[in-house]
Image: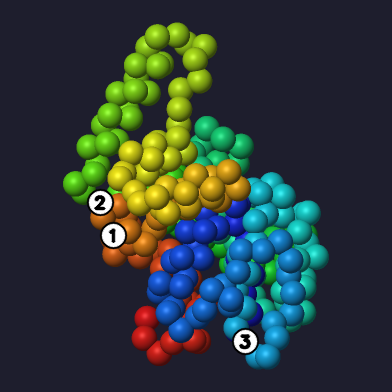
Amino acid sequence: MYITIFVEGNESLFLQNLILKIVPELSEEEVQITKSIEKSVDGKHRINIFEAGGFATLHLYKVNFEKTLDYGGINLVIFDADSSSKDYGGFEARTQYLELKKAELKLQFDTFLFPDNQHDGDYETLLESLIVEHHREVLDCFRGYQGCISGKNSSYNVPGDKEKIYSYVSVIPKTEDEENRFKKRNKLKRDDFLFERTDIWNLESSNLQPLKDFLLRYLKSTTTQL
């Protein structure tokens, strides 16, 4: 099995962790965050998580789409649907844009748009829906902070959803190793939000099922049980 998943970037570590969780037969060596589309060796499975930077950059990576096909693989695109306030934003508009680009560039790929391949939103929308119930009050504090900032001066930059999720994880008590992972990964622009901690994230939430179903449609050849 050979798959390249084109992502915007920030969600790459989350997807790697999720794939290893839902298909435990795969190893971390087989599920790699990479900028290089290489041929698999020794008949091993290879799932590339390729950081493409955004929905408007597909033309820059045409050769990577083609290399995946040359290696007998399939291409997946997992981007944000975003809101209708952004260019080509909203689930319907973003889907239409990607389909037009697929035809224009003669690419082959299947698409999933965060949060659930149905509604407007983004990766952070999905993450917010996965926060465990007894920590959700932290979000009320953050919304109060946003309201306070916006009410003080219209020229201030009001922190958004990315800052909200970062702030949520930052206030959770962590071990020294976890704190180092959290800070180091964010310097690399790949958020290590400690997704293995069930007291922070509910990865069994039904809100995550559409993404799991999408991934398993292509990963199921490695397992007999979805």
Q: Position of residue 209 (x, y in %)?
A: 35, 65
Secondary element at image label 3: loop
Quadrant of res 125:
top left
Secondary element at image label 2: loop
Q: Residue at x 33, y 30 (%)?
A: 142
Q: Of marks 1 and 3, which one's residue comes earlier in the chain?
A: 3
- How packed is label 1: few (under 14 Cα within 10 Å), some, or many (20 or more)? few
Residue on which the image places disc 3: 44
Q: Position of residue 68 (x, y in %)?
A: 72, 74
Secondary element at image label 1: loop
Residue 84 appears in the figure:
yes
Q: Residue at x 70, y 86 (%)?
A: 41
Q: Amino acid at mark 3?
A: Lys
Q: Amino acid at mark 2?
A: Val
Residue on which the image places disc 2: 132
Query: How far is mark 1 from mark 2, CA to CA?
Result: 8 Å
**Marks 2 and 1: in contact by CB < 8 Å?**
yes
Specify whether 18 is left or right of 189. left
**Marks 3 and 1: in contact by CB < 8 Å?**
no
Residue extending farthest left = 134
Residue on which the image places disc 1: 198
Q: Of marks 3 and 2, which one's residue comes earlier in the chain?
A: 3
Which part of the image, by quadrant, shows the C terminus? bottom left
Q: Position of residue 211 (x, y in %)?
A: 43, 64
